[in-house]
Image: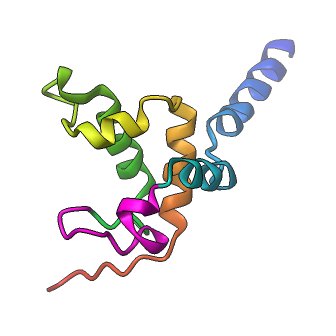
Amino acid sequence: MKFALITAILLSSIGVAQAASADKGKALVEKANCASCHGAGLNAPILPAYPKLAGQYPDYLYYALRAYQVGGSNAQFGRNNAVMSSQVQSFSDADLQDMAAYISKLPGNFVIKK
């Protein structure tokens, strides 16, 4: 009985411990000044080469941010961009998840062309 209770408590807490916070993410995105390159609402980049971020899937955003942290040191996972790499170095894994959760909730204007 005790084993079942402990197991149930641990399993129910997994989602809570892993849940990203869009509110925390908003503060982190503002602190990092992401809009200075990615534009208003992270949907109007200042240069065409910069991506629109608003409305992207949170897992895609997280893995992209994480790949910039890894940088060019890992050819299979890293992304080599000096500006983005320096922007994300100080953030924890949880911070990146929070940022991705916030950015994914912003309204984007992506269109799928058929």
Q: Is residue 39 covered in magenta?
A: yes
| Viewer-side residue, 91 vs 15 | 91
Q: Position of residue 36 (x, y in %)?
A: 42, 61
- Quadrant where the C terminus sits is bottom left
Residue 96 to residue 113: above or below: above
Q: Residue at point 56% right, 58% down? A: 102
- Quadrant where the N terminus sits is top right
Q: Position of residue 42 (x, y in %)?
A: 43, 67
The image shows a total of numbered marks equal to: 0
Q: Quadrant of residue 9?
A: top right
Residue 37 to residue 69: above or below: below
Residue 73 to residue 98: above or below: above
Left or right placement of residue 49 versus residue 26 in this view = left
Q: Residue at point 51% right, 47% down? A: 32
Q: Is residue 44 covered in magenta?
A: yes
- Report the colour scheme: rainbow
Residue 79 to residue 106: above or below: above
Q: Position of residue 55 (x, y in %)?
A: 43, 69
Q: Residue at point 18% right, 35% down? A: 80
Q: Residue at point 67% right, 48% down? A: 24
Q: Position of residue 95 (x, y in %)?
A: 56, 38
Residue sitting farthest toward the top: 3
| Viewer-side residue, 112 vs 14 | 112
Q: Quadrant of residue 67?
A: top left
Magenta residues, start to end: 34-50
